[in-house]
Amino acid sequence: MRLGSAGRLWLMALASVVLLQGCSTRVGKLYFDFRAYFNTYYNAQDFFELGLEKNIPEPTIPAPGNLIRVFDPPGAGGKGEFDLTIQKAASILRDHERSSYVLPSVLLIGKAYFYRGEYFAAIQKFQELRTLDGTGRYGQEAVFWQSRTLYEMGNHLEAIEFTEQALLEGNWIPSIESKTALILAEHHTIAGDIATAVDLLTLTIEQFDDDRLRPRAQFLFAQMLEQEGDYAFAAEVYRDVAASKTIFELQYLARKNQAAALRKLGEREASLELLTEMFEDDKYRDQFPEIRLEIGLSLVDSTSGESIEESIQWHQQTLRMDPRRLRNGTLPPEFRAQSYSAIADLYRSQKNYTMAAAYYDSASQVPINRLRVPPSYQPQETAQIYGEFLSLSTQLSHADSLLTLADLDSASLQEKITQLRETRAIAWREEQKQKQEAGESLVIIDASGGDQDGTTDSEYGFLSHLNPERVADVQVQFQALWRGRPLSDGWRSAAIAQALNATPDPVMSGQEEGGAVTGVVSGEGESEVDPLEDIDLETYVPPDNQLGIDLQEIPLDSAIREQMTASMAMWNYELATLYYLSLQEPQRAKEHYIDVVRDATDPDIRSRALYVLTEIYQAEGDRDQAAELAEQAIEIGAVDAIVRRLVSEFGDGLTVAAPVDSQMVRDSLAWAQQQRDEQSLRVLIDSAKQVDSAGFATQQFVDSAWVDVRGAIQAYVDTYTSPESKAQLDTDRRNRWQSVLEYLTVADSMIQKHYGTFNLPEKEVEVLVADSVRADSLE
C-alpha cells in the first residue's frame, strides 16, 4: 500500500513528535540556556566586570608593623554598573528559572551587593545560594563570599564559627577551599589566634591558584610565621614573594622583611649582604632611609661591643645623610625619629640610661605620621619613662651628695666645697675659651655660591641649600657672629650682667634714643665691649651661682635631713618601680627596694617594697628569704590586699602577728556595727570587692581592711576577760559583737558567691588587741 504525499507528511510529523519527546529534557535545557545567556546573563556579567574595574582600588601595601590584607575591601566606584548587574541577573531568576544560569545569577547578585557595600543584602543572597546548591560548587563559593562579607562587617567570631563548620561539610573543590581557608585565616589573625592561621595556610596555600593574589597570600603567611618565631621558614617565603611577579612595593617589602627575618635568625652577615645590595641599587633610591635604618639594626652583634659603636655611628650618619640621595632632599621625619630611637636602644643595651634618655627625648620631639610607623612605636611614652628615670636619678644623686656633705665636719666640708669650686671653675673657663675661639674663627663663604669641587647650583638647589657642607658652614658663621644671643631688647646689658654677676641696669636695658648705653662706645663705628675683656680666664673664679653651687641646700638641720631622707626613700621607690616594671631589670630594682626598706619611715611604702622584694627573691629561687620579708611586711602593717597575697603564698610556714592599735580596733568595730545596724550588706560587699580588685595599688576600704575588721572583732570576742565579764551587761555586749561577726561571715559567703575572685586567707591573721582597749570604749 502506497501512501500519498499527505500521508507521508503526517508520518514525518508523528516521528518528529516522538523524537522530541525522547530528548526534550536535553534539547529544551540547551534552548533555555541559549536564550538566558544571550538575552540577559552575558549583559549582567559584562556590567559586573565594568563595575569591578571602577571599584577595585590599586593594590595596597600594609602600614609598617601591620599584617597585609589579601582581599582588599570594596571601593566606592561602579555602583551604577553593579545596579544594572543586579537588574539583569534578577530578570534571569524571573524569566529563565529553568536555565542553568540561575545559580550563577544569584552569586552575581550577591557579589554586586557586596561591592556596593550592602552587606546584609549580600549575605541574604549567599545564604539563598547555599540553600539552592547545598555543598555544590556555587554553595562553596557562597561560603567564601559570605565569610568575606562578615570580615568587612567586623563579625570575625561569627565568621570563624560559620566558616569552620562549612569547611567540614561536603567534598570541597581545592581552589575554592584554599581561598576559603585563607579568608578564615585572616579572621583568626584579627581574633589574635596566629597559630591557627598558620596551620590553615600551611595546609592550603599551595592550592591557592589566583596569580594576582598569591604573592599577597604568601606575604601574609610569611608575616604570620615571623610572629610565631619561625624566622627560617619566613625568610624563605619572603624570598619567593620578592621573586614573584607582583607590584614593586610588595617586592621591596618582601626583601626588606627577608633581611629582618635573617637578622632575627642570627644570620647577621646574610642580612647585611642583602641590605647592602639593595642600598647600592638605584631602584630603591626612595627607600634609602629605611634601608639604612635596617642596616644599622643588622650591624649589631650582641657578642661584640664594637658592633654597637659601629651601629651608633651608622645611625648618626643617617641623620646627616647627603640630601642629594633623599626624596625631596630631606630625611623623612619618621626615619629621623626611628634613628634616634635606634641609637637610644643601643645605649640602653649598654646600660647607659642617661644617653638613652637624651635620644629617646629627641625621638619624641619629631612630629611623625602614625600611619608610617609600627603601632608598637611609641616614642612619647618611652621618652616619658626615661625622662622620669633621669629626673629621679638626678634628684637621688644630688640629695645623696648633699647628705654626704652634711655628714662632714667643718674643715672637711670647707675643703670639699673648695675642691668643687675649683673643678667647676676650670670647666667654666674652658667653656668661655671655646666661645671666644668660635667668635674669632669666622667662616667666610663665597657669596657667588661657587665651591671648590666645581659643582653647580643646579645640583645643590637654590642658594645651595642641598649642600650639607655649605649649610654647616653658614650655621657656624652665624653662631660665630652672634654667639647664641637672644633676639630680644636689652640682650647686651643682660649678657654683661650675667658675666659680671651684676643686676641689669634699667637704663642699660632701656636703649634710650640718642644717648650712649653703658657697655657700648657711642659714635661712628660703635663697637661692642666684650664683658669678659678685662677678666683673666686663666685664674678667674666665677661666683657660686654661676657654678651651680648653693650652700644653703646642704641639710645641716636634723629636721631637714629627715625630710630629705624621706624624700629619697620615695624617689628610690619610684626608681625601683621603673627598673622593675619598665626597664625589666629586677637586680637593679632589688638594690633600690632594699634602700627603701632601710630608709623609709612610711610603713606603707616599706611594706610595698618588701612585697616586691618577696616576688624578686621567689623568682630567684630563694623562698626562705622571701618568706622572711613577707613576715616583715605583715608585721609593719601592710594593707590587707598585700597581707592576703603574702599569707596565701607563704601561709604554710608563716607565723603572723599583725598588731592593731586601739584606735584601729575602735574604728573597725564601730564601722562594722554601723554597717550591721544599717543593713548595708551591698556596701560591705562592694567595699570588699574594691579592695580585692584594686590590689595594693589603692586602699578604699574605709580606715581598715576586711581581714582587720573581722580579726578585730574576733580578737575582742575571744580575748576580752575583764573581771566583770560574767555580768549580764558584758555578756550581752559580747553577744552583740558575736552577732556582728556572724553577720560578716554571711557577707563572706555572699562575696564568694557573687565575686569568686575574693578569697579570704586560709589561715586567719592573728590580731593582737592592746590591753588599753576597754569594753566601754567599744560600745
Image (cartoon, rainbow, N blue to C red):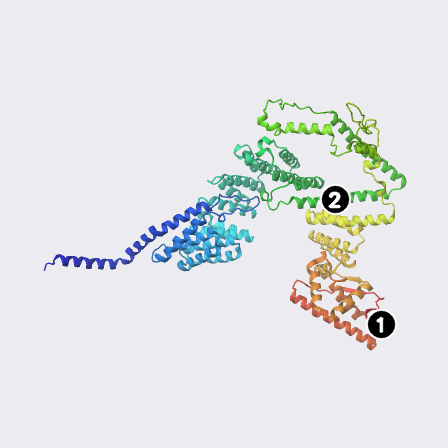
Question: Mark 2: which amino acid?
Answer: Ser
**420 lies above or below 204:** above
- The quadrant holding residue 301 is top right
Image position, residue 233 (x, y; %): 52, 44
In front of the other: 21 or 301 = 21
Q: Residues within 10 Å of mark 2 (few under 14, many from 20)?
A: some
Where disc 1 sits, the SS reads: loop
Tag count: 2
**500 lies above or below 736:** above
- The quadrant holding residue 644 is bottom right
Q: Residues within 10 Å of mark 1 (few under 14, many from 20)?
A: few
Q: Is residue 585 visible?
A: yes
Image position, residue 705 (x, y; %): 74, 62
Q: Is residue 193 visible?
A: no
The residue lying at 57 percent from left, 43 percent from top is: 64
In front of the other: 289 or 633 = 289
Residue picked out by circle 1: 722
Q: Earlier in the sequence, mark 2 or mark 1?
A: 2
